Image (cartoon, rainbow, N blue to C red):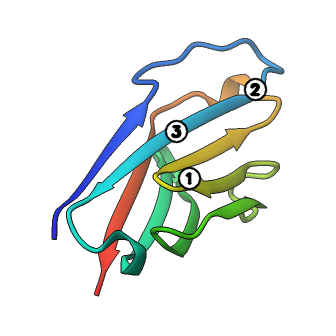
Amino acid sequence: GALRVTQEPGELQVTAGDTVALECRVALEVAEGEALLRMEWLRDGALGVLCVTRLIFGIPLPPSPCPRQAPGAQLAWHPPRATLSLPQVQRNDSGRYLCRMTLEI
């Protein structure tokens, strides 16, 4: 099956101290309720993968903390939307963030 991922917003400017929510939407051309996905949020530079989890397409995942690479960050899944929340962003949080979804077999 096909997997299509779109990310919003394409570009975002915020002030230090703001909370930021980055989203990606997933569209599947398979039996959605049975699809197992690997979701990763990556950041350019040395940080690499900020958050990673496995999920079933149709089952929501409440906000959960990311590992220590992204202190305070939370990951949530409300099909078909994944959200990475970054509280109290600082200048060193700037960069390109990428939502990567992989359909697992």
Is there CB contact under 8 Å for labels 2 and 3? no
Q: Which mark is residue 23?
A: 3
Which is more toward the observer, 77 or 11? 77
Q: Disc 2 to disc 3, how far (Cα)?
A: 19 Å
- Residue 72: give x, y in percent of width and height: 82, 49
- Tell me the amino acid under the disc marked 3: Glu
Left or right, 4 with respect to 21, comes to left
For disc 2, the marked residue is 90
- Tell me the amino acid under the disc marked 1: Leu
Mark found first going from the N terminus, 1 or 3? 3
Q: Secondary structure at mark 1?
A: helix
Is there CB contact under 8 Å for labels 1 and 3? no
Left or right, 21 with respect to 56, comes to right
- Tell me the amino acid under the disc marked 2: Gln
Q: Which mark is residue 18?
A: none
For disc 1, the marked residue is 47
Q: Closer to the camera: disc 1 or disc 3?
A: 3
Mark found first going from the N terminus, 2 or 1? 1
Depicted 75 relative to depicted 33: above or below: above
- Residue 6: give x, y in percent of width and height: 33, 40
In which quadrant of the rendered view does residue 14 lie? top right
Identify the residue at image location x=37%, y=61%: 101
Left or right, 75 with respect to 26, comes to right
Q: Is residue 58 visible?
A: yes
- Residue 15: give x, y in percent of width and height: 73, 12
Identify the residue at image location x=36%, y=77%: 35
